[in-house]
Image (cartoon, rainbow, N blue to C red):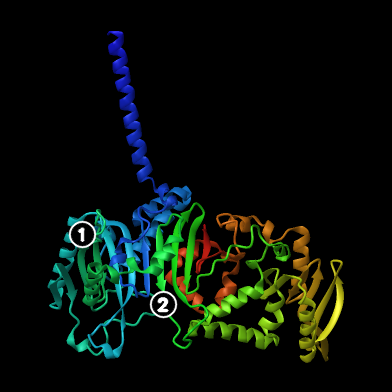
Amino acid sequence: MKLRSFFSFLIAGVLALLGLSAGGFYWLTTHTPLNLLAGGPTTTPAAAVFVSKQAPLLASMLVNPDRLEALRQVFATPEERSRSHAEFEQIKKSLLANTGLDYSRDIEPWIGDEITLAVIDIDSDGDSNNGKQSGFLLAVSSKNVDRSQQFLDSYWRKQSRAAKTVQSEIYKAVQINYKQVPIAQKKTSPISPFNPFSLPKTTLPPSFATAAIGGSSDSGNSPNFVLFANSPNVIRDAVNNVEAANLNLNNSPNYQKAFQQLTQGRIALAFVNLPQSQTELNPQVSLNSLAVAVGVNRRGLLAQTALVTSRENTAYPTLSEPVKALQYIPSASPLAVASSDLRNFWADLSSAVSTNAEVSKLVDRTFGDIQQVWGVNLQQDIFNWVQGEYALGVLPNSSNSADWIFAAEKSADSQKAIDKLDEIARSKEYSIGSFTLRNQKITAWTQLTTSQNLGKNNRKSAIETEAKGVRATVGKYEIFTTSVEAMDAALEAAETGSLVANQDFQTSIEPLPPSNDGYFYLDWPSSRAIWEKQIPLLRLIELSARPLFDHLRSLTVTSTGEITGIRKATIFMRLN
């Protein structure tokens, strides 16, 4: 072989190998589930064109369920993989239970990279005098139009043989198939009002409709969707929203503003149009909408939120590291709240919740109960003087309840506030005494109680002292606890290691932005029993999202400022 021919052959071979390598690398990088760490194939739901601007809720998963399962398998240990697969299979079966559908046979061959659920206000019976009802629209993208159409045809053939209530119509070139509600059931609305606290039913509603429809024609790549709804009216409205772009959620200013602020990779998102106050005509700040974008982290789920308000305020995060007040929260604390300027935070919170009557009643009732028990006005006696750092923690005790620890940086008004607390204690006939604990002067508000000691031959009464509250001044902080044991734990934490030095806490705040306004931290396994005891509704919520709660290790929330009236926050759900 001539030298020139050899080099030509060698160059051609190298180019071929490079081409194969590049092709293989491209295939691996586009098909590996690790790509989901940077987000799903799309950033916003194409199905938003089917949903009206006024829709109360839209929630989308922007990735094929099978790819999500594959990512979970990558991070699972060999021992956990079979369990993880079984959990995904159970979710698929439970969502389709009593529907006659099988995910592997009927859905998996055609399902694409988007599943969008929307709650829509509709006029279910054409009578505008009886108000709106809630309709539900499920839009599932199709990667194989023929297979998805075969699925619909097969399903409705079976329904036609089983009952004579199946109807079909062509509405603006879209074929809609639906079950006709029997006349005997006409007195009862086929579409129930939306209740966010009710568990989803696994049976199909008596009025059920489907359609196959293309996505937005504005883009060159028009995705195809299979629509499911609990009324044909819902699908008719979806078709109208596609035709009139100004009607759909995709062109809502609040929708666009919110998601422009959520920049991280996402596999799911939600958008909520918040109900407006009917009692306050000109609120200082109204909450318009809330957007949530959920991404995947190697240790769990990372979510960003954007709350759209009526004002055009801009506020930058005030902290660049955890507040020093956390040094008095023991490492065993399953809950901690830490930030600065409690007075300003409470003013903003009060203004925000006042725009929603139901939320305002809930907050007033919660704080009203605390104020009645303690005999204090929280805003005037506590919140107003806390203008620097503060930290609040919970310490479980032997009675399966909890002690509280509150550490706040002193201010010019702190001594006046403490004197006021002493006055309140005296008015409730508590004794005020001092003692030394860990070389610190401690003040306790105590109450004398009696207990009966039963012996064999006599009965004796013993006088006991019960601490109603304990406080101490340590350096530049005022520390308040609900027991002497909790105060001892707070002082010990500063000496031997507090929550901020705990590895679990550090892992839980690591994915969050370093510039923030503080943290809300919850260790779920350690506090689960406490919260289930305090909040009976929590058990119902756990049942509706059991896979998440079973794997939840901790929940950490931080606020990251406000940009032109959009308040931003980041949430990290650490999973086992």
Q: In which quarter of the image is the N terminus?
A: top left
Residue type highlighted by circle 2: Pro
Q: Which of 179 and 409 is in front in this view?
A: 409
- Disc sitting over residue 410 in the figure: none
In this picture, residue 163 sits left or right of residue 196? left
Q: Of the two numbered discs 2 and 1 on the same chain, state the one appearing first in sequence.
A: 1
Percent x, y of residue 161: 12, 72
Crowding at mark 2 (Cα within 10 Å: few <14, some 14-19, many 20+): few
Percent x, y of residue 456: 81, 88
Kindly identify which residue carries mark 1.
148
Q: In which quarter of the image is residue 115?
A: bottom left
The reply to whether the C-beta atoms of the residues labelled 2 and 1 are less than 8 Å apart is no
Vertically, is 31 above or below 454?
above
Residue type highlighted by circle 1: Ser
Percent x, y of residue 269: 40, 63
Kindly identify which residue carries mark 2.
196
